[in-house]
Image (cartoon, grey):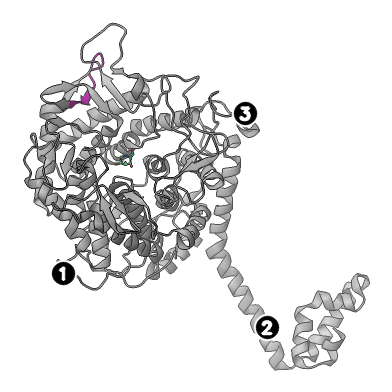
Amino acid sequence: SGAAAAGPPRRDFIAVTLGPQEAAGAGGYNNSKAWRRRSCWRKWKQLSRLQRSVILFLFAFLAVCGVLSYTTMGVSWKSLTDTALDDQRTEQEIPGLKLANPAVLPAPQKADASHGDYPELSQQKPPKLPHVRRGSSSLQLKAPRRDTRLKAWPGTIRAVEEPVQADKEEKTEKSVISWRGAVIEPDQSTEPPSSKIKEPEKPLSVEAEDQKEPVPLTQRQLAVIEAFRHAWRGYRDFAWGHDELKPISKSYSEWFGLGLTLIDALDTMWILGLKEEFEEARKWVANDLVFDKNVDVNLFESTIRILGGLLSTYHLSGDSLFLEKAKDIGNRLMPAFKTPSKIPYSDVNIGRGTAHPPRWTSDSTVAEVTSIQLEFRELSRLTGDDKFQKAVDEVMKHVHTLSGKNDGLVPMFINTNSGQFTHLGVYTLGARADSYYEYLLKQWIQGGKKENELLEDYMRAIEGVKKHLLQKSQPKRLTFVGELAHGHFSAKMDHLVCFLPGTLALGVHNGLTADHMKLAEALIETCYQMYAQVETGLSPEIVHFNVHAQKGHKDVEIKPADRHNLLRPETVESLFYMYRFTGDKKYQDWGWEILQNFNKYTRVPTGGYTSINNVQNPSNPEPRDKMESFFLGETLKYMFLLFSDDTDLISLDKYIFNTEAHPLPIWVPA
Ligand code: DMJ
């Protein structure tokens, strides 16, 4: 400081700004305040006018920056901290989040030990909730203007008490930042790719023309966030970068060796607003996700989970990393289509570029070859390279013309050499056929409701379902979808079929006959009963319905081989659609019951959730030690959306969910 007093101006500057050090050097803390004031004032006077002006300007500048950064960042960080705190205290403080641990799972940790069942949330006085800022309510897909990376965070939770700050931020963002970070050019609608290869589309974007008032997160959404974090904690601790968590043995399993759970969960984290988790996962994708591997992957599974997950994350975040990865895996999957019939093989070696059917057959599964279209079509639209769309459209066109259908219902297998259906005569809406029906409708919606053959096939199939597969159970007269095998009806229904009520409701929302809604309402009641009539309140993989009244028998019967639960999403998925379209709160209540039962019987205290072997034994549900990637990709995502009252949160007029719950843009949104 002494040097500062006598030295050149630059040193003076340093001395003034670091005043406390200077004071300490000149007598330390014993100096009186008055002395320090005089000393400072003397030095100030010794400065030239220019120096004083510069200093004053700097102070003013710093003050302005401070105010600005408080208004833009402060609230976000406050809310993030709130969220983190929420996470820590959730289990103790948030009503309805006390968790029970079944005896079969490993001994609960102390924190969980006191947990009881969930009290009914509706009876609780709701605490003050944070709000999530929601962006555009009119997402439109446009030719993008520029690539942006994570400019805005979706789940930025902010307090409602700060409308002025929110306003300011909205204004700033409007011109540059769109919904959840992507940037778009107004007034250009998204079209399917032309038949020629063209220049790649720039990053797609989603827009924020109209910023809305924040919509509060509900207690139940917070419970989903808590559940997700618990699941993620297990994955992060014991299975990071691997396909699936084995939560009981605190290890992992590999299927493709491609971090399946991590990729499947990316857009869920984005939607739930889990910034830190997302950023960490993004780093893994950037640094560790490598597709150049000598590994056989299933075309369908890797398309719906990996390609679908990357594409939707790209759309939500605007981060081109995900598009690059999507292109990479998309290209590596293309050899599957090199078959005599153009019906793709089930398996592809993504490192070697070779494809083959399963070892025991040259058949592929019908659902598998007809449920990859949303993703490949979108990849073409984004890259401008129509080879992806051509390959999958060809499959649909071919299947459209095939004989062997029964009033629109398709068999379960198709031969990759002949292109013909095989194993004729068996019809189901369950495994191996399910998402064929789902993708007929969804492709039609994705493409702007122009591809009439898709709609025809869908409508015909639903008529086929009504004619051949619907019956009512006893005693409750639940409408269910059975199976037909060579003319014989079987009252067997897979849990997988529970995608159907949601799909039917989506069709009605898009202008199809109101009859379908009646059927959807009846079927979702049945799917709910598949949970409610079971001892744990969780559905088995397959049920058989009683079609004849028998004393003491419920509607639902379960065979020993079918009583497992894999944490599947289909019922929750349909509950989400039903709630979105009807606003009937009973659907939320049913979903809430299901979440509570997942927490009660499948939650592993040390992190993660496990599939179970026996839904009929509450005292020993027999954990299977596996958390399927779709629990994070689908089940919890649909739960979160079901419990939201914000219809613009992944608007169903702008997005179509692929069969793994990854939202992709509708090309010509409503
Ligand atoms: C998911 O991979 C998809 O939902 C698929 O359509 C069916 N199977 C699982 C979930 O149950």
Closer to us: 166 or 416 = 416
Residue 59 at x, y percent in the picture? 66, 79
Can you identify the residue that label 1 sits on?
A: 196
Q: Extreme front residue here? A: 359
Which element carries disc 1, helix, strand or loop?
loop
> The residue under label 3 is which amino acid type?
Ala
Left or right, 543 with reference to 265: left
Mark 2 Cα shell of 10 Å, populated few (<14), some (14-19), many (≥20) = few
Mark 1 Cα shell of 10 Å, populated few (<14), some (14-19), many (≥20) = few
Q: Nearer the viewer, mark 2 or mark 1?
A: 1
> The residue under label 1 is which amino acid type?
Lys
Q: Relative to 339, does residue 644 appear above or below in the rendering?
A: above
Left or right, 130 with reference to 420: right
> The residue under label 2 is which amino acid type?
Leu
Q: Mark 2 or mark 1: which comes first in sequence?
A: 2
Q: Residue at x 90, y 73 (%)?
A: 28
Question: What type of secondary structure mainly makes up the magenta span?
Answer: loop
CA–CA distance between discs 2 and 1? 62 Å
Query: Which mark is drawn over residue 56?
Result: 2
Residues at circles 3 and 1 in contact by the CB criterion of under 8 Å:
no
Residue stretch in magenta: 474-483
Residue 323 at x, y percent in the picture? 35, 63
The magenta stretch spans residue 343:
no
Q: Tag count in the figure?
A: 3
Which element carries disc 3, helix, strand or loop?
helix
